[in-house]
Amino acid sequence: MQPNASPLHAAVADDFAAVDRTILAQLASRVPLVETIGHYIIESGGKRLRPLLVLLAARSLGYPGERHVTLATLIEFMHTSTLLHDDVVDESHLRRGKATANDAWGNAPSVLVGDFLYSRSFQMMVEVGSMRVMEILSGATCVIAEGEVLQLTNIGNPDIDEAAYFETIQGKTAMLFEAASHSGAVLAEASPAQEEALQLYGRYLGLAFQLVDDLLDYQGDADAMGKNVGDDLAEGKPTLPLIHAMSAGDTEQTKMIRRAIRQGGLDHLDEVLAIVNDTGALEYTRRRAVEMADRALAQLELLPESRYRDSMAELAHLAVERQT
């Protein structure tokens, strides 16, 4: 069960292999469908960035133990459970080029297996044995849930501004990145300054990744992404390319974007694509992503030089350079 291998994983290759083994062990259930769906979604080809952040953060501060493997595994389970739930909420049929679990087995099994993975992650949290880590992760789950609800309530709403957009993506995406690097630092008994640096590193990295995701929805390659261009527009999601296009466009362009967000669907996709290009909305979104990646990189200056720190720097570069 190997994720998309990259040089980023090389610094913690042995730890990553241990995470893979732990994932398999923790998926065990007396209910066969739990294991079947769990394996399906876990093995669907993700980069496993969040568990990677745990491993790199802990090792960058010289952590010598093994509990970071359990911590990385439970972070991946938390992430996977949100994917299962999100696909049901979004009525998605495709993720990373494969049928979603809800498309293959139905909504109810997907939701319930997501609940199982969340519950299993809290069992592993107890195994880690750190109240500080439990405090960080339990708090993160609330913020993530609020972010998902906020996104849901914003669907079809063209009055969302940039501040509200960033609040949403901080909750639904960046929070788990932040919790991963932050908890890894706590496990390694970081100094207060280093702990804060790794917390902020994860936050800014997560924001950069989500900004590029939202950018690629309007200029990405459908085959490479495993989803269709315009999916966010089809769902009526007011992401930053649309928000900036409304603020930078003329009256008619703004009216068109507002109408497209309210209606959802792809009837106006060609017009919207033309507007986000004409208004520089894609370039603006990319600049904001680069800004967040640069902020993440700045936090690494508080860490000692190591191959782990180098890998975290490469992650920040990857966030804004990727095309999928």
Image (cartoon, rainbow, N blue to C red):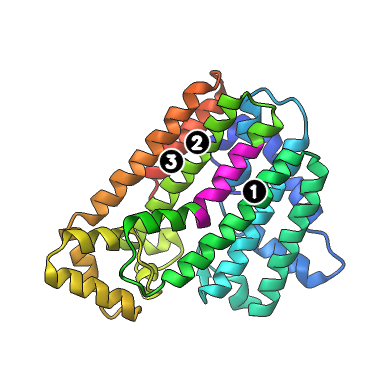
Distance from the alpha carbon under mark 1 to that under mark 2: 26 Å
Q: Whole-percent x and y of residue 3?
A: 60, 49
The residue under the point 59% across, 32% down is 10
Mark linked to residue 201: 2
- Check disc 2: other Cα within 10 Å, few if <14, some if 14-19, many if 20+: many
Amino acid type assigned to the residue bearing label 3 in the image: Leu
The residue under the point 32% across, 60% down is 161
Extent of the magenta region? 171-183
| Mark 1 in CB contact with mark 2 (< 8 angstroms) | no
- Residue 69 visible within the image: no
- Residue 175 visible within the image: yes
Q: Is residue 143 magenta?
A: no
Q: Which residue is mark 1?
A: 2
Of callouts 3 and 2, the N-terminal one: 2
Q: Whole-percent x and y of residue 268?
A: 25, 77
Q: Secondary structure at mark 1?
A: loop
Amino acid type assigned to the residue bearing label 1 in the image: Gln
Q: Whole-percent x and y of residue 287?
A: 29, 44
* Between marks 3 and 1 in the image, the one whose residue lies nearer the viewer: 3
Q: Nearer the viewer, residue 41 or 54?
A: 54
Amino acid type assigned to the residue bearing label 2 in the image: Tyr
- Check disc 3: other Cα within 10 Å, few if <14, some if 14-19, many if 20+: some
Q: Which residue is mark 3?
A: 318
Q: Secondary structure at mark 2?
A: helix
Q: Quadrant of residue 121?
A: bottom right
The residue under the point 17% across, 58% down is 248
Of callouts 3 and 1, the N-terminal one: 1
Q: Is residue 174 magenta?
A: yes
Q: Whole-percent x and y of residue 138?
A: 68, 51
In the rendered image, the residue lying farthest to the top is 305
- Check disc 1: other Cα within 10 Å, few if <14, some if 14-19, many if 20+: few
The residue under the point 35% across, 45% down is 289
